[in-house]
Amino acid sequence: MKLQLHWQILIAMVVGVIVGVVFQIVYDGEPTGWLFGAIVSLGTIFIHLLRMVIVPLIFSSIVSGVASVGEGKRIGRLGAKTFAYYFISSLLAILIGIVVTNAFKPGVGANIPVGEEFDPSTLSTPRSAGQILIDMIPLNPIEAMSSGHMLGIIFFSIFLGFAITRIGDKSRGTLQGFFEAFFEAMMKITQVVISFAPFGVFGLIVATVASAGIGLFITLGLYMITILTGFLIHLFVVLPLLFYFGTGINPVYHFRAMSSAMVTAFSTCSSNATLPVTMSDVENKAGVSNTISSFVLPMGATVNMNGTALYECAGVIFISQVLGMQLDVSQQFLIVLTALLSAVGAAGIPAAGVVVIFIVTQAIGFTDAQVGLIIGTMLAVDRPIDMFRTMINIFSDSVGAVIVAKSEGETNLYPALT
Ligand code: ASP
């Protein structure tokens, strides 16, 4: 009997950790050699394959999805539900971030190692909330596609899908048929790429584990435990409850349906790169229609980031604890608001969450010089946190897709599991 894909991936992960530790010990944290190079290439090839399919996949998926929604009223309703879900789930994540950091106080008395000066300007600058909205409109859709500018592609695709519903029957039929067929072919590519996941995940995990020094992890242990506790509460309590109240379905079904996407997110640290797998799981295993999934998931990969939102909030409270500053209620409120916006502004790529944390620290009045070193240290231990963050980000998107599907009267959910 052939082992199911998510088991193959999990086994690849475990073996990857073991092999990674061996490389770490043998090469003392700076692994080299052809064997290591070959293993790391497996991960790189996997990421390339995923990224290759993202743009044509989301383009065809959104256009055919929106075109099949039909009337403008329904598009508006879907949009409202989707954004309501993004907002509620992100807000809950942030509140958990506040509670755990105030309870554990990981920054109080933390001895942050002062290594070399960290220059915040070496990280790309975050964009303001207004700019994010303006940037959604691409000056040139082809350019947006070639540079992988997700929000721009999404904006143009929704617009095109909508336009298709408004044109004459003959043209509409032609275009709808074309985009549906194109989307089908992209999904096929995705499935082939996904079957390569165990090898890709193995390469990514070996690369991560082999080069991680553990000294800093011990110093920042309480910080990491705090954030991970918040993540676990959100993943195993809040999101399942939201799921259950929104759908009436046992959340265990959903965890099982999303297993491949979750492990892919965990090992790639990128919501965007995981998007093809997320879509495949949500449509093929959770049974959500393409119409809904293409509405909720691509936008969710960029906009709805629960793990990142929780991290922004917890991270900034941690920083203020390190600096010995007490935050009053209005400052905490400002953190909530900016954490929400910064999570929207974060791109679905590795370590994006650390870049946008400056939006929040600046908003409550810290200068880059004050926080630069602390953030640099946080960056040094960010990889494992990013793994969980990304997993929660995409899991929340998928929960939203099922809730919206259920509310729209879809009945064929979890066909293989129920
Ligand atoms: N890596 C995360 C993602 O792709 C973003 C982040 O760094 O928080 O979802």
Image (tube, helix red, strand yellow):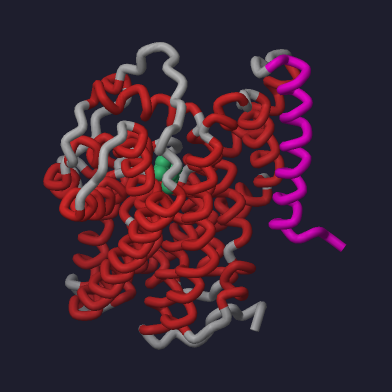
- Main SS type for the magenta part? helix
Out of 211 and 79, give the one closest to the viewer.
211
**Residue at the spot 16% in from the left edge and 53% down from the top edge:** 330
Rendering coords of residue 38 (x, y %): 70, 24
Rendering coords of residue 34 (x, y %): 73, 16
Q: Quadrant of residue 16?
A: top right
Question: Left or right: where does residue 347 sit relative to residue 49?
Answer: left
Rendering coords of residue 329 (x, y %): 20, 55
Out of 156 and 259, give the one closest to the viewer.
259
Q: Quadrant of residue 362?
A: top left
**Residue at the spot 48% in from the left edge and 35% down from the top edge:** 382
Is 3 one of the magenta-colored residues?
A: yes
Q: Quadrant of the C terminus?
A: bottom right
Question: Left or right: where does residue 192 sit relative to residue 141?
Answer: right
Q: Quadrant of residue 196?
A: top right
Question: Left or right: where does residue 248 sit relative to residue 330?
Answer: right
Q: In this orientation, does residue 147 appear?
A: no
